[in-house]
Image (cartoon, rainbow, N blue to C red):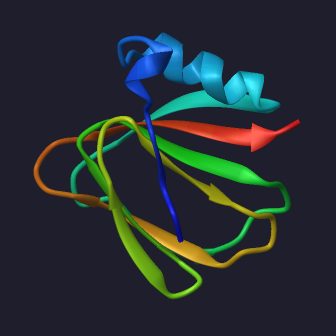
Amino acid sequence: LKPHSWNPADGPFTEAGLRAKLESLGYRVAKYVYEPGSVFPDHKHDVDKIDAVLWARFRLVVRGHMKVLGPGEWIEIPRGTVHNASVMGDEPVISLDAVKL
């Protein structure tokens, strides 16, 4: 479970920059806001996806490995992989949810 981090060589970290990076990898991107206390129990998707964080902290457990993502971090979740997630702390998570085209 290795998250990716924004590379400053790609320019300043912005929502538009991260969206463009994910789209360049062949993903369709949607923005979501998850309120504090939000919990997503074990589930899986029929598509390859990326969970990326623009703001706050998002806890993910993928294949039994836990990682807390912060701004500028994202993780690839292959189709069919069971995972769960929850918002950490008192701030809403602003997330880019990307699915492979």
Residue 23 percent coordinates (x, y): 72, 23
| Residue 40 in view, yes or no | no
- Residue 60's image quarter? bottom left
| Residue ID at (24%, 60%) | 37
Residue at 49% across, 47% down? 74
Q: Residue at x 47, y 34 (%)?
A: 32
- Residue 58, visible in the rendered structure: yes
Q: Can you name the residue that lies furthest to the left here?
A: 90
In the image, residue 23 above or below residue 16: below
Give how far across and how far down residue 52 sits, in percent.
Answer: 49, 42
Looking at the rendering, in which quadrant would you find the C terminus? top right
Q: Position of residue 13 (x, y in %)?
A: 37, 19
Which residue is drawn at the image coordinates 13% and 56% (left, top)?
Answer: 89
Identify whether 90 is placed above or below 84.
above
Describe residue 74's horizontal placement relative to residue 68 as left or right.
right
Residue furthest to the right in view is 101
Of 86 and 24, nearer the camera is: 24
Viewer-side residue, 65 vs 41: 65
Q: How many marks?
A: 0
Q: Is residue 63 left or right of residue 69?
A: right
Q: Nearer the viewer, residue 92 or 75?
A: 75
Q: Give the vertical position of 17 relative to 29 (above or below).
A: above
Q: Is residue 29 toward the left or the right of residue 41 in the image?
A: right
Observer-nearest of 36 and 5: 5
Q: Is residue 73 above or below residue 88?
A: above
